[in-house]
Image (cartoon, grey):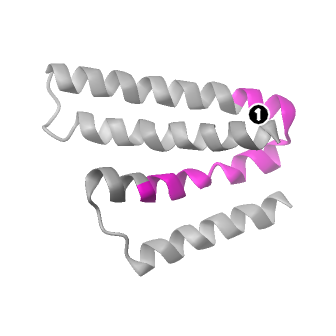
Amino acid sequence: MINWVILIIMTMFGALGGYFFKKATSYGIALQKTFVINLFIGGTLYVGGALLNIVLLTKMPYTIVYPLTSITYLWTLLFSYYFLSEKITKRKLLGVFFIIIGAFILSR
């Protein structure tokens, strides 16, 4: 059970890292305070996710861990909707649905 919790946190860190990178570059790339802070937070989350990935790979097979990292797409869809006011279309939902179903089929 703990491995699944780590997997969820790892994928969430990946999606949040991407969100903060997007936030860092939303006003262009310049050495401004908000750019540096958001870049640091995004990088920290990415590194945290990578470290959790390493932990998971010591406990679970690679053929399970790697496909299930596609859960990141679900978090990305949700975070972009709630934090960036992006629209969730039927096409996006269907795409993420098929990716996640495929990952679970591969991991079984």
- Against 68, residue 5 (above or below) is above
Figure disc tally: 1
Amino acid at the residue labelled 1: Leu
Please say whether residue 25 is one of the residues in the magenta stretch.
no
- Against 79, residue 46 (above or below) is above
Say which residue appears at 46% left-offset and 23% top-offset: 44
Circle 1 — which element? Answer: helix
For the C terminus, the quadrant is bottom right
Q: Where is residue 6 in the image (x, y as percent from the top left)?
A: 70, 36
Q: Main secondary structure of the magenta part?
A: helix
Left or right, 77 with reference to 30: right
Say which residue appears at 42% left-offset and 26% top-offset: 43
Which quadrant of the figure has residue 65? top right
Q: Give the range drawn in magenta.
A: 54-78
Q: Position of residue 83 (x, y in %)?
A: 31, 50
Q: Position of residue 8 (x, y in %)?
A: 64, 44
- Against 20, residue 91 (above or below) is below
Q: Mark 1 points at which residue?
A: 56
For the N terminus, the quadrant is top right
Disc 1 residue crowd, few under 14, some 14–19, many 20+, Cα 10 Å: many
Left or right, 80 with reference to 92: left
Which residue is more in the foreground, 103 or 90?
Answer: 90
Looking at the image, the residue that sits furthest to the bottom is: 90
Please say whether residue 68 is one of the residues in the magenta stretch.
yes
Which residue is more in the foreground, 32 or 29?
Answer: 32
- Against 84, residue 3 (above or below) is above
Q: Position of residue 67 (x, y in %)?
A: 70, 53
Say which residue appears at 50% left-offset and 52% top-offset: 75
Which quadrant of the figure has residue 59? top right
Say which residue appears at 79% left-offset and 62% top-offset: 106
